[in-house]
Image: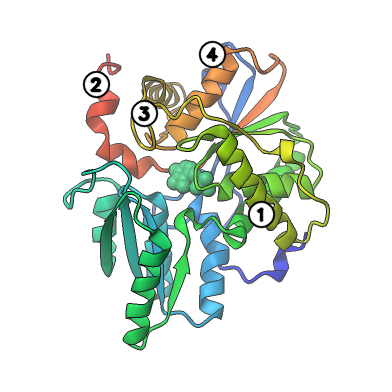
Amino acid sequence: MHLARFPRRRYTPSWTPLEPMPNLSRELGGPELWVKRDDVLGLASGGNKTRKLEFLVADALEQGADTLVTVGAVQSNHCRLTLAAARREGLGCQLVLEERVPGSYREDASGNNFLFRLMGAERLEVVESGTDLTTTMERLASDLSAQGRRAYVIPGGGSNALGALGYVACAEELLAQTFEMGLPFDHLVTASGSGGTHAGLVAGFHGLSAGVPITGVSVRAPSTAQEERLHTLAQATAELAGVHTPVPRDAVRVIDDQVGGGYSIPTDAMIEAVGLFARCEGILLDPVYTGKAAAGLISLVRQGRFAANERVVFLHTGGSPALYAYQDVLLGDSSA
Ligand SMILES: *Cc1c(COP(=O)(O)O)cnc(C)c1O
């Protein structure tokens, strides 16, 4: 792998911190828990999409695009960060928002939705769940080209092989960092949504022969479907990165017991996890992704899946702006 060969914009000046979580480890009576703080990546309020956008936006600029077009849910962190990257680069930005939960879009909603308006998205097209999102984005792109502009269309979550290179880079960073710190680790747990994060890490660990299992906690899809899709993406990402051995199917492991009622629907375990991270470590998770991923981590610890002397890294993929749109749910009955 030789990632310096790819055009890249740089939105974070250095490695994100890797921090111990001694209070949470003690509270759970489990293994040694650490957190990789990708919630403090660059661009507005950070989070995992920043790493993918470094490669995607560089490609857009190479291709002479003047406008970024992308898609996400109504509280999409990916849309917020794409918009922030567009602003940074002096590009236009148009967003398609998918109402995955019917009736969930509110123009005056807080959280990321407020930030779409604050950073001035040029166009917000709200569509029902089940709408063909690729076709919708292509329509926006052709409207732009009719105006003499040039769109660059980024898939949902920035999760194509090029975007996933951001997480191949993160795999390299994490291994270099743990080497630097003299801190070998035994397991990594992360949220698994559109999949570029999880697939990029799988491709990176495979390419580097890291020998560290990764558990992805699904926030939407059933585990088998998610594993199949991610294996294809991890394979494509590995090939793009220049890895010539196939990614083993069993390198892609997804658990789906935290999805609850569906994407973005709160669960008791998510509420508990958000509260535990906040109170034990002063770390802000989010209700849609990292809250459920942390609930998955906590449940694995409680099931005794890790030995007491193992070191487990939780990848914090960001998302805290969405907390402010879920205040009632999060303070409901667990605030005492
Ligand atoms: C998008 C997102 C994820 C999921 O990452 P994917 O690469 O889409 O699987 C996790 N956490 C947060 C905060 C996100 O915004």
Question: Nearer the viewer's eye, disc 2 or disc 3?
Answer: 3
- Vertical relation: 172 (above or below) 191: below
Q: Of residues 221 and 160, which is closer to you in this image? A: 221
Q: Nearer the viewer, mark 4 or mark 2?
A: 2
Q: Name the amino acid type tagged 2.
A: Gly
What's under tag 3, amino acid-wise? Gly
Task: Out of 316 and 141, give the one closest to the viewer.
Answer: 141
Residue 30: give its label: none
**Is the residue marked by circle 3 packed among few (<14), some (14-19), or many (20+) residues within 10 Å?**
few
C-alpha span from label 1 to label 3: 33 Å
Q: Quadrant of residue 335?
A: top left
Q: Earlier in the sequence, mark 4 or mark 2?
A: 4
Q: Amino acid at mark 1?
A: Ala
Report the residue marked by disc 4: 28
What x and y, as percent, mark residue 249?
73, 40
Figure quadrant of residue 250:
top right
Q: Which residue is mark 1?
A: 169
Circle nearer the N terminus (2, 1): 1
Q: Which residue is mark 3?
A: 261
Q: Position of residue 112 (x, y in %)?
A: 31, 50
**Residue behind mark 2:** 332
Mark 1 falls on what kind of element? helix
Q: Quadrant of the C terminus?
A: top left
Work out how far the residue at label 2 is from the one at label 3, CA to CA, in angstroms. 18 Å
